Image: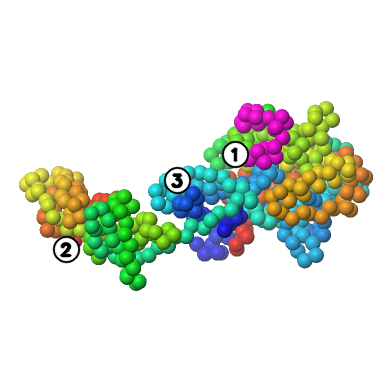
Amino acid sequence: MDDLERLAAKKENLRKRDLLHRVVRAFFFEHDFLEVATPQKSRWLLPEEHIDSFAAEDGYLLPSPELHMKSLLAAGFERIFQISPRHRKGERGSRHLPEFTLLEWYRANADYRALMSDCEKLFLALQARFGDSLHYQGTRIDLAPPWQRLRVREAFRRFASWDPWLEPDPDRFEWDFAEKVIPALAGSRPVFLVDFPELAASLARLKVDEAGTAERFELYVGGLELANGFSELTDPVEQRRRFERANRRRASLGKGPIEMPRPFLDRLSRMPPSAGVALGMDRLSMLFTNSSHIEEVVAFGPDE
Amino acid sequence: MYEAGDLKKGLKIEIDGEPYILTDFEFVKPGKGQALYKCRLKNLITGVQFDRTYRSGDRFTPANLDEQQMEFLYKEGDTYCFMNTSTYEQVFMDADRVGDAKNFLTNNLVVTVTLFQGKPMAVSLPIFVELKVIKADPGVKGDTATGATKPVTLETGYVIQVPLFIEEGETLRIDTRTGQYVSRVK
């Protein structure tokens, strides 16, 4: 096959992908969200241990719209969403692209439970347009809500046989999360992993009634990690501590520090209690086109 | 040195002093965690495969492998001698390293020898070789049932199953991947 034949062969997947985008937009308009566009490039980044950004002249290509969308919440916007291309350095595999498309939505005066409920409703809307029977890599996926909320602590006890709350080891946590927990989630029903240990929460609010536990969730459908959301941390002092911790861990991995995003921290104190979530549109397209490789759902991969 | 980000299918690396090739590779990075690199590795000497997961920060030594066209010269006891066809440099391998290839080696056959850190590690044969039958019992007359075979001995001492019509002195074409008879060579 030559280049153009390869492109032509993606027509059906790209048509379905376009339909997904339309349904997603219609869903958020229907639920009274405002679609926003925020910068691709900025001189400020949110310091995270495992996210690296491409330098672009006097700034960076942003790995997510989080920084700016939260600023909008602080300014009084209540329900906002955005679908935009984002960039992360070094991420390339069957489920990763260094340039990918991210859907993010935020609700003021809500917590992570509202976002999980949004996810269930969004998938019902998608299913209504795509037909009842969804198959992913040989497994029939049953999207009927409610979906299981599996606590991370329970998942670790069950699949990794240890408790990250009793032994807070970030390295071991990440390793077993990838090697033992995620592989156990590839069933026929979507699963929300909920309530992460504090060590795995860079921007999420901690629960008041449960020590060391962040109100964060991840959504897995057919074994695909689709979304990551949380109740937002709005305390600038605590947020600064988390950013400093991220930079210390970066240093231990031999990575350079990320400059403290002072304007973001200044705005944070004026942000209402809120919740936000990011969902990978490429992964969503993989699910609905039954594609095993992410490059099957984009017209051009990084080498093309 | 390679970094974890350099890992990809086909890359050759050294582990515990032995050369390996990545036969399968997958990048995973779940839940805002660190990037992990899931690899399937094959030992280039023994062929043994295993799975191992690496993380960013891991470093790898490239396997210093070299493939050279060499002619098989002679065998003395358990030692096989090969000669580089362009430099005329000679290398020696023992029978264990030569492995099953010894069943198909005839004088002046050109093979590919894999060298690791300058030492010969493995012999790859051409897919087809031609070998002479030095001993064959006559086929039983009248027995023409399809698939009927008999054993014959080739010039290397290798015994192979062939159709009944094959006679002593004939040259046969052998598939070295399966070690099986392909056809007669006229």
Q: Nearer the viewer, residue A258 or A296?
A: A258
> How many residues crowd mark 3 within 10 Å: few (<14), some (14–19), many (20+)?
some
Q: Does B53 lie within the magenta span?
A: no
Looking at the rendered image, the disc whose residue lies closer to the viewer, 2 or 3, is 3
> How many residues crowd mark 2 within 10 Å: few (<14), some (14–19), many (20+)?
few
Q: Are marks 3 and 1 on the same chain?
A: no
> Which chain does the numbered disc 1 sit on?
A
Q: Is residue A30 left or right of residue A300?
A: right
Q: Can I make out residue A286 in this image?
A: no
| Distance in Å between CA atoms under marks 3 and 1 | 19 Å
| Distance in Å between CA atoms under marks 1 and 2 | 58 Å
Q: Does A174 lie within the magenta span?
A: yes
User: The residue tagged with tag 3: helix, strand or loop?
Assistant: strand
Q: Are marks 2 and 3 on the same chain?
A: yes
Residue beneath disc 3: B49
Q: Nearer the viewer, residue A136 or A243?
A: A243
Residue beneath disc 2: B186
| Distance in Å between CA atoms under marks 2 and 3 | 41 Å
> Which chain does the numbered disc 2 sit on?
B
* The label number, if any, that marks residue A238 in the structure image: none
